[in-house]
Image: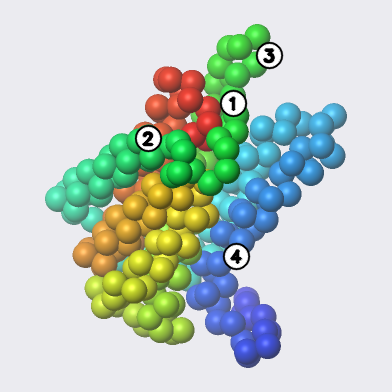
Amino acid sequence: MNLRVFSPNGVLPPPLLARAIPFVIFIGLLAAEPWLGRQLADVIDARWLYGVRSIIVAGLLWFFWSRFEELAVRRPDRRQCFLGVAVGLVVLAIWLTLDTGFFVLGQSGSGFDPRTGEGLLDWPLALMRLAGSALVVPVMEELFWRSLIMRWLVNADFAAVDPARVGISALLFSSLAFGFEHSQWAAGIIAGLAYGWLYQRSRNLWLPILAHAVTNAGLGVWVLVTGAWYFW
């Protein structure tokens, strides 16, 4: 199937669409979630919409998988994996530190609270949230922010850009945008710089995906242990 759409500037190539569509759908469903929750209140607990969103995006990633040439490379070796895990844990520590005041856009809300009305943890709901953030989101966001945006800032033909040749300006601007996607903007910028540096250094997108997954999984475990739902 030849996926092409027309824009005022011409035709958008399939590689761009494959990396942009899952992210755009994820953000669009996130924005629509309050409205959807109200419309479906009699049918489904609105908190399960996160799982629906994750399944839809996972399906899109599976559909476009053959177009992700950067994921067809050799998996990271043991030393690289150790580096990815270490970076992910450092980012996690920063995320848990820069969580108040100037470092947060707006006010922290109640977050995703997977407890029942009796105050007990609803494990299926909690594990759904953890799986979506640790398994789906890292792949989706690294394909969009690092593979697409960071390289596109160097050349519109981003697929031809060697990650090792990405300059500081592309790394910085993509990290700024990534940071302000999150309410914890400062931690987000640092995370973007860390994941982007990993991609530059290793030329292997699996490494920032691993680091991102470690950060998100660690954050999820922290939330479940401490009850700091506002991180979710």
Viewed as shown, does residue 59 lie left or right of 188? Answer: right
Q: Amino acid at mark 3?
A: Gly
User: Mark 2: which secondary structure?
Assistant: helix
Viewed as shown, does residue 43 lie left or right of 90? Answer: right
Q: Which residue has dot 2 on it? A: 96
Q: CA distance from mark 3 to mark 2?
A: 27 Å
Q: Nearer the viewer, mark 4 or mark 2?
A: 2
Percent coordinates x, y for residue 106 in the rendering: 57, 43
Category of crowding for the residue at label 3, using alpha-carbon neighbours closer than 10 angstroms: few (below 14), some (14–19), many (at least 20): few
Q: Residue at x 27, y 61 (%)?
A: 197
Q: Which residue has dot 1 on it? A: 113
Q: Nearer the viewer, mark 3 or mark 4?
A: 3
Category of crowding for the residue at label 4, using alpha-carbon neighbours closer than 10 angstroms: few (below 14), some (14–19), many (at least 20): some
**First in sequence: mark 4 vs mark 2:** 4
Furthest residue toward front: 102
The reply to whether discs 3 and 1 touch (Cβ–Cβ < 8 Å) is: no
Q: Nearer the viewer, mark 3 or mark 2?
A: 2
Q: CA distance from mark 2 to mark 1?
A: 18 Å
**First in sequence: mark 2 vs mark 1:** 2
Q: Nearer the viewer, residue 189 or 16?
A: 189
Q: Amino acid at mark 4?
A: Ile
Viewed as shown, does residue 78 lie left or right of 34? Answer: left
Percent coordinates x, y for residue 170 in the rendering: 36, 73
Percent coordinates x, y for residue 203 in the rendering: 26, 67
Q: Which mark is residue 21?
A: 4
Q: Which residue has dot 3 on it? A: 117
